[in-house]
Image (spheres, helix red, strand yellow):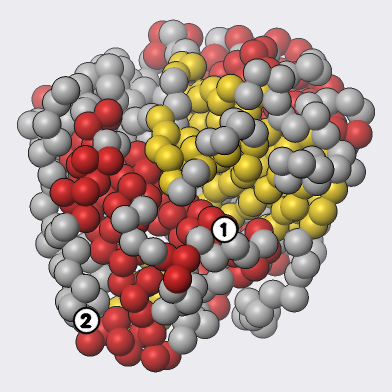
Amino acid sequence: MKTPTFNSRRSPVYSRRGIVSTSQPLATAAGIEILSKGGNAADAAVAAAAALNVTEPTSTGIGGDMFALYFDARTKAVTALNGSGRAPSALTMDRLKREGLFAESLPPFHAHTVTVPGACAGWCDLIEKHGSRSMAEILAPAIRLADEGFPVAPFTSYFWSRGADRQLKSALNGSELTIDGRAPKAGEIFRNPGLAKTLSVVAEKNAEGFYQGQIAESIVRVIKEAGGCMSADDLASHVSTWESPISVDYRGLRVYECPPNGQGITALIALNILEGFDLAALESLSTEKMHLMIEAMRLAFADAKWYVADPAFSKIPMAELLSKEYANERRKLINMKHATLDFLRGAPVSSSDTVYLSVVDGFGNACSFINSNYMGFGTGMAPKGWGFTLQNRGHNFSLDANHPNALAPNKRPYHTIIPAMVTRESDNSLYASYGVMGGFMQPQGHVQVLSALADGRLDPQSVLDLPRFCIDVDEAGGRVAIEEGMPKETMDALQKLGHPLYEVTGYERALFGRGQVILRDAETGVLCAGSDMRADGYAGSL
């Protein structure tokens, strides 16, 4: 298969009646189907998310977690849903020591990395609060795709193949997500009757059908067979949480993120720092702008990697971290003449593989929605006969007992997946529903995309087409990946400033995330959307 090029020739998509933007055409179609039947943004988002479980299991699944931000056009309020799961009640540091697994981190695909899958409860809770259709109607398109089969898209086929070689070939029941042990080829039909059965149970019984009964029993069984310790009670006691979103003002726009245990605060810290610079006066891919954005992200990650944890276990100084005063102090640490590779976390004074989708309906309601297994197929382990794999979010726990994100029973880990929502400060009207998926790239993508929208005044598709950078936050010295297409003079100048760069091309450009953006015009209500060229999807409209 020829490696695709990324010189997009797409135009942005315009509509007045509603837009669904996802990384898979069939998932976009599922969301549009629900909108066309009178469903709203929440209904269409869950329909698209469920269809993505079928068509892109390389990135997402009902065995993973979800987060959502919802803008209600009537009240102009933004609500945040945390649909992430918790560690098993029997999983402790002492247990890891007894089992010889105590190291810097858990092995990435071990059964102990499986946290309770929160996606299903999150879907149902989103619909209960904001939806207008039954789960049976919402899940019907995904059930049809899973039962009848669908032709696999090219990017998905490529990453499916990587997952088949990496996790699925050795994980318990992982072969159920393959065709005779291999990934489906581009254009090849893949059927998943097990997932159709799972979704049918949820359509009939809602979340109870997933967290109790046969599906739950199969989840517990496969985890225990693989050496894990999740119990039926861990699943039955799971709950999502509705939380107050966190936000900052950026040049007259109110930018919302879900609060920790998600890493959305990272993007907000960086935006606060960048607000002190006149980015609108700089070219989108200029050396000065790239330097400022990279350094702001380094500062933000220095804080986030310490402070982001489950707030039920650790006090997080969110107001202080997001204050303009704190940003002013942190901004002073940026040196325009050279890169700083070792920023330390600040001390404010008290007073993440994934799918992201965006939906705005014809009434102006918006749902910014993200769902993930982590690391592709997660652990690769599949409850026998049910057509989905289990996530490995527990890999993000720290095994340092003194760290706020230290592993503990019934605790949520540092989470990489984050949706974003933006309103106008002047009248609280919807400005944008957007996100960029992809591990620790996500807050970096949020910042780069929003700056291109607000500072560069580009349309959504042009914003998503721009080359990006991605700081490797887990590597000493923080190397910076630069996407092919960045001007050579910019790269050369950044290296002279001391940034350790390397270029990424071809399919590996998935590193830079795959985003979806929908803007809404405050006066006309016209929607304008873009979908990332780094994936198989598109923005569809009514």
Circle 1 residue: 453
Circle 2 residue: 497
In the rendered structure, find residue 151 and report the number of the disc placed on it. none
**Which one is closest to the eye, mark 2 or mark 1?**
1
Q: Residue at x 87, y 39 (%)?
A: 17
Q: Residue furthest front?
A: 426
185 vs 343, nearest the viewer: 343
Q: Residue at x 75, y 57 (%)?
A: 538
Quadrant housing the C terminus: top right
User: Amino acid type of disc 2?
Assistant: Leu
337 vs 42, nearest the viewer: 337
Q: Residue at x 35, y 39 (%)?
A: 265
Quarter of the image where one finds residue 147: top right
Q: Position of residue 130 (x, y in %)?
A: 68, 18
Left or right placement of residue 51 versus residue 400 in this view: right
Q: Does 274 sit above or below residue 68?
A: below
Q: Does 308 sit above or below residue 75?
A: below
How crowded is the residue under tag 1: few (<14 C-alpha within 10 Å), some, or many (20+)? some
Q: Position of residue 441 (x, y in %)?
A: 41, 56
Q: Position of residue 439 (x, y in %)?
A: 41, 51
